[in-house]
Image (cartoon, grey):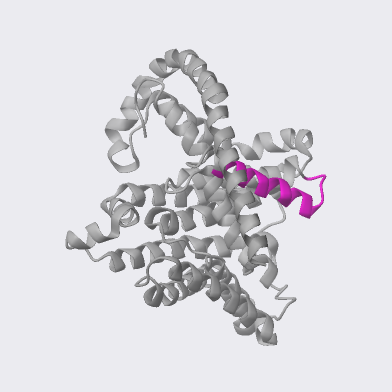
Amino acid sequence: MISTILLLGTVLATVTRRLGNVAGTVRREVLLPIGQALERLLAPIDRALEPAANAYNRSLGPYFGTMTGLQFALILVSVVALLTAGVWAPMVGPLVGGGLLRTLALASIWAIFAMSWDIQSGYTGYISFGHSVLSGAAGYTTALLIVHVDPGLSIWVTASVSVLAALVIGLLIALPTLRLEGPYFSLITFVAVLLFYRLTTAFSSLGGIPGFGQPDVFTWDPVMRYYYMAIPMLLIALGLTFMARSNLGMILVAIRENESAVSAAGINPTKFKIWSFALSSIPMGIGGVLLVGFTGNVDPETFVIVDNSIEMIAMAVIGGMSSILGPLGGAFLFEFLNHQLFHSYSTPVRYLFLWGLVLLVLVFARDGLFRMIWHRLGAVRGESE
C-alpha cells in the first residue's frame, strides 16, 4: 500500500513538473512572440483612444480605477454589447446553437455569484466552498414567503426579505469561522453547504428533494428576461468595483498578502473579513432572487448543492480572481461554452471540457484569462491596471 502511494506521488510529481516545463515553453516560444506582435499593432489604436480614456480617468478614475485607451475601449464595447444584446443576440443566436439570450441571462446571474464570491474569497484569500448557501437562503426565503405566507406578496417585499435572509445566514457563517485561519475556514464553509443541503431535503415543509414549483418566473419574454438579469448584474459590478477600489478593498488585499502585518498596523482583520462576507452576502441574495425569477422553481439541485459553489470558484479562476471584472468575464465564458459551444454534448462531457479548461488556466494563466488580457492591453504603452 505504501509503495503504491509512493509510486502515485512520484508519477504526480513528474507529471506536474513536465506540465510546468511545457507551460514555460509555450509561454516563451509561442505566447510571448504573439503578444509582442499584437502590442505593435495595437499601440496606434491605444494612442488614438487616449483622449477618451484620459477624460474618464479625470472624472471617474479615482473611484473605479484608471485605464489606458485600449482598456477603456474594451470596457465600453463590452457594456454596449451587453446593453444591446436584446437586439443582436436573437440574430446571432442561431449561429451558435440558439437560445443565446437565455444563456446571456443565465450568465448574468452566475456573474453576480462569481463577483460576490470574489469580493470575499478572492480579495481576502479565505476560500469559501459554501457560497451557494447564501443564494439558496434567498431562493428558499422567496419560496417560503410565497407558499406559506401570501402568494400575492409584492416582489419588492419578497426580494427585500430574501436578501436580508442571505445577509443573516452569511453573518451566521462568518462570525464563528473568520477568526479561524488556514484550511479550517474553507472546511467549515464546505460543511455549512452540506448541512444546508440536508436541511432542505430532510423536511417536507422546506420542499424536500422536489423543492418548490410555485414561485413564478419574472416573465416569459426572452428579451425582457435578459434585461431583468443583466441590469442588476451591471449595477452590482459597478458597486463591487467601487468597493474593491476603496480603502476597504485595499485592506482586504492586505489581509490576503500578510494578515499579521495588518494586525501589527493596528487594524482588526477579523472585522474587515466579516465586512467582506457581509458585502458578499448581499449580491449573493440578489442573485438568488434573480435565479428564482429565471427558473420559476426552488430546489436543492438548482440552489444549494456544493457544485454551485465550485462553479463560482471555477468562473473566478477562469476570469482572474481578486479583480471583480475577471469573474464577470469568466462567468460569461463558462456559460457560453457550457450552453452554446458544447451544447450538443452530454452534460458529463460538457463538464469534462470545462474542468479541463480550468486546469489549463491554472497551469498556463494562473492570473486568469481576462486579467491576463487586461494587463496585456495596459502594457501596450507601458501602463497597467
Q: Residue at left 62%, top 61%?
A: 308
| Nearest to the observer: residue 384 or residue 93 | 384
Q: Is residue 323 magenta?
A: no
Quadrant including the N terminus? bottom right
> What secondary structure characterizes most of the magenta part?
helix
| Nearest to the observer: residue 286 or residue 16 | 16
Quadrant including the C terminus? top left
| Nearest to the observer: residue 165 or residue 364 | 364
Q: Is residue 344 magenta?
A: yes
Where is residue 79? Give x, y as percent: 51, 37
Q: Residue at left 28%, top 64%?
A: 269
Can residue 228 be seen? Answer: no
Where is residue 253? Give x, y as percent: 33, 52
Q: Which residues are magenta?
A: 343-362
Res. 361 image quadrant:
top right
Q: Is residue 12 left or right of residue 270?
A: right
Can residue 124 be seen? Answer: yes
Where is residue 147? Give x, y as percent: 66, 80
